[in-house]
Image (spheres, helix red, strand yellow):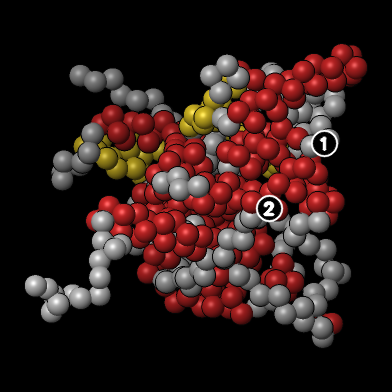
Amino acid sequence: MAKRRANGEGTITKRKDGRYQAAAYVFRPDGTRTRKFAYGKTREEVASQLTEMQEMTRQGIPAASSTMAFGDYLTYWLATIAPERLKPATLNSYEGLSRLYIRPALGKKRLNRLSPADVRRFLAEFKAACLCCLRGADEERPEDKRTCCAVGRCCKRRPSARTVQYIHAVLRSALQQAIREELIARNVARIVETPTVEPKEVRPLDAAEVRLLLKTARPHRLYALWLLLVSTGLRRGEALGLTWADVDLTAGTLRVRRNVQRIRRELIFGTPKTMRSVRTISLPKSCVQALTAHRTQQEREQKVAGAKWQQTPGQPAGLVFTTLTGRVTDPRSLNRMLTILCRDAKVRRVRVHDLRHTCASLLLAQGVDARTIMETLGHSTITMTLDTYAHVMGSTLRAAAEQMDDALGLEDVDDDPEGENAA
């Protein structure tokens, strides 16, 4: 006979329908306790859920219930579920959107009473409102901070379609978890359509502008970084997360396996954006030469810094691009550096990310195929590559048409398609 579980350890029973049921006392958001149930096809499955519920109770984390306020459920989801599934930057973005926009509008709605009409109305009102007044509803904002509309001068800044999509993504993800926990029967956010996003036209630098920019950047201590960004299309965080162990100057390759991002006030090292982003890239000879010179320069800087050469907590050893004291370079500082470089080079101002687009456009102009560009940039699918750079493929498509003429040998055919003048 199986030993009975002690009081407070929860219970596991088999139901008449063949499924297993686990029950345990958990905390509600208001601090009281209630009995919560979990279901599964096997005893091991519900035992795992029971252990999770009990661990949350020991930590004082309230459990979700179908009747709790949606704002409380968002807090629960962002604190317990989302950190396991989202990258730090995405989680930080979701927390901000929830605090600024979602919770003030839908926070008091009961989770099991949230309807498609509620979501649709909220998204419509959000899209039509000005950003200043939307942020004025932030619970952490001082009460005496009046919004622009309150003083009769609307800023007329409206949320972009992309922001509306992000808001919808937060709602959809949170409610999908509620379905998994059998708190609600359907995801009402999935029923509501969101506005389509008009893709912004990519405006990369042309070859002449790139030469001017690199010529101006030549004396810069991070010249190798600017050349690397243009030549390989690395993302800003990927380049700043490189260590010398990732670079093989003899073979002329580098391996992308981490990135660095600023999350609130901290610089966080993490994994790249997608699995495709973990990749090995072949380096042009100019990059190998620049990195070799940069390594020698960095060794000199370390000797000059002496005891001041220190690493930021959590920083991997041997970063390629550091400050003069050996610390990780803040990704935001590159924006300011590039603005100055563009001004001094007398080229139009571009973002650091536009150098990635510049790399792709230069490769396309040289006739490199889309699959190779996808692998170089670390795109998750070739569709993303083709959609992003379709407008700069005109010359490539024209070259392909001319090559077809060469392959068929029809460029010298006369204008007598019917053969009327044939003997």
Find disc 2 in the rendering and name its residue: 208
Residues 175 and 310: in front is 310
Residue 168 position within the rendered picture, expressed as x and y whole percent measured from the top left = 50, 64
Find disc 1 in the rendering and name its residue: 220
Question: At label 1, which amino acid type do we have?
Answer: His
Q: Nearer the viewer, mark 1 or mark 2?
A: 2
Task: Check disc 2 and report its element: helix, strand or loop.
Answer: helix
Residue 355 at least partly seen: yes
**Residue at image coords 51%, 42%:** 377
- The disc placed on residue 367 is none
Task: Check disc 1 and report its element: helix, strand or loop.
Answer: loop
Q: Quadrant of residue 59?
A: top right
Residues 251 and 134: in front is 251
Question: At label 2, which amino acid type do we have?
Answer: Ala
**Residue at image coords 85%, 27%:** 324
Residue 228 position within the rendered picture, expressed as x and y whole percent measured from the top left = 65, 36
> Is 329 placed above or below 200 here?
above
